[in-house]
């Protein structure tokens, strides 16, 4: 659908800046419900109707979700855009300055030229699952940080404080896991998908919750798209005959999903027959340890996408079957 107006929003914790095209009308509002309503009044002042306006803002976590939900409820066409896309677009414009107002204008121009995919808010259940799974990741990371500090701390007072903090974090982790388990068990679709995921060696409860919250299986056509969505596809550095850089993960994608697959991939390298076979081939080819870990994360996500898309549990003999069924 072609829209008459395009609005770019640069979101921050306390405020957000907007730029309306055409005309480059700019304004700043408080990132509060009152500020949301003030934005709508400002758009009405400029004779902008929801059906004629496409709004874009960066998908930068929790700061913009309340505003996005509000604007969607008002009937605006809305897109949440990967910040990397905005950054690369800004570079293509050769912009040298960076201000909130200028960022809003760049986002508006991106929206006008690229027509990004429209966003629909997740269900309340999915939003809660996402919030709890991300909190669990943060808590697990904080617990590991304190464990690392405890290993090197020498002062008895510091060690005592760190042990207490570690215990508190562990208690919160167990509580959040219980809440996630109850949420998944209360919804048949979540429960059915979770039962499929845990059949994959290396995938546990925490990973399952993150996958259910972060991986939009219904919007992805194949496993390669799933890997790209998580930023797990390799990025090559090659130019002419002189530049032959080592490939690395693109990391342009859903960071929560990518982060959640790291430790499960390490586990899968020890117990998942398909990923173990992959690692053996890569070691024989002289690949580095981190290259193998990245490949394991990508393959693990392929397996996850496969069981969810086919509604079939993990089959450890999949490789043998695929080889047997392939043409000679």
Image (cartoon, rainbow, N blue to C red):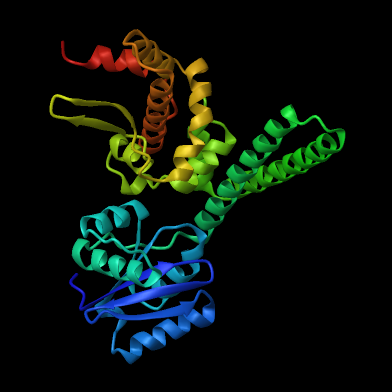
Q: Residue furthest bottom?
A: 45
Front in this rendered view, residue 302 or 184: 302
Measuring from the top left, give residue 120's x and y in whole percent.
38, 63
281 shown above or below 14: above
**Quarter of the rendering containing residue 229:** top left
Front in this rendered view, residue 244 or 23: 244
Q: Residue furthest left?
A: 240
Measuring from the top left, give residue 264's x and y in whole percent.
52, 28
50 shown above or below 175: below
Measuring from the top left, give residue 98's x and y in whole percent.
36, 64
Q: Give the position of the C terminus as an image quadrant.
A: top left
Q: Left of 177 or right of it: where is 68?
A: left
Front in this rendered view, residue 2 or 328: 2
Measuring from the top left, give residue 153's x and y in whole percent.
76, 31
Q: Left of 98 or right of it: where is 90?
A: left
- How many numbered markers are drawn? 0
Q: Residue furthest top?
A: 284
Residue at 66% of width from left, 37% of height from top? 145
Residue at 39% of width from left, 10% of height from top? 280
Q: Is residue 59 in sight in this rendering?
A: yes
Q: Left of 181 or right of it: where is 219?
A: left
69 shown above or below 279: below
Q: Give the position of the N terminus as an image quadrant.
A: bottom left
Residue at 34% of width from left, 89% of height from top? 44
Residue at 34% of width from left, 66% of height from top? 103
Q: Is residue 82 in sight in this rendering?
A: no
61 shown above or below 225: below
């Amino acid at each position: 659908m072609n829209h008459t107006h395009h609005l770019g929003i640069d979101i921050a914790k306390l405020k957000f800046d907007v730029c309306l095209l055409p005309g480059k009308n700019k304004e700043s509002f408080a990132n509060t419900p009152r500020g949301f309503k003030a934005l709508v009044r400002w758009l009405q002042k400029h004779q902008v109707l929801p059906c004629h306006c496409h709004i874009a803002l960066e998908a930068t976590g929790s700061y913009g979700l309340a505003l996005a939900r509000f604007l969607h409820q008002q009937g605006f066409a809305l897109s949440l855009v990967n910040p990397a896309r905005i950054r690369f677009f800004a570079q293509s414009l050769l912009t040298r300055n960076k201000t909130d107002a200028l960022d809003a204008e760049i986002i508006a121009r991106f929206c006008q030229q690229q027509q990004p995919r429209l966003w629909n808010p997740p269900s309340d259940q999915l939003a809660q699952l996402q919030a709890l799974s991300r909190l669990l990741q943060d808590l697990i990371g904080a617990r590991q940080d304190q464990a690392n500090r405890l290993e090197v701390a020498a002062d008895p007072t510091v060690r005592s404080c760190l042990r207490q903090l570690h215990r508190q974090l562990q208690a919160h982790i167990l509580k959040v896991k219980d809440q996630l388990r109850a949420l998944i068990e209360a919804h048949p679709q979540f429960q059915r998908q979770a039962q499929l995921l845990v059949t994959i060696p290396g995938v546990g409860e925490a990973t399952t919750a993150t996958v259910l919250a972060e991986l939009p299986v219904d919007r992805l056509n194949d496993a390669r798209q799933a890997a790209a969505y998580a930023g797990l596809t390799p990025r090559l550095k090659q130019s002419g005959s002189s530049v032959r850089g080592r490939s690395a993960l693109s990391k342009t994608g859903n960071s929560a999903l990518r982060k959640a697959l790291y430790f499960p991939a390490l586990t899968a390298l020890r117990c998942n027959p398909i990923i173990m076979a992959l690692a053996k081939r890569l070691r024989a080819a002289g690949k580095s340890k981190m290259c193998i870990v990245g490949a394991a994360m990508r393959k693990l996500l392929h397996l996850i996408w496969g069981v969810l898309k086919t509604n079939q549990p993990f089959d450890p003999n999949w490789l043998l079957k695929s080889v047997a069924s392939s043409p000679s």
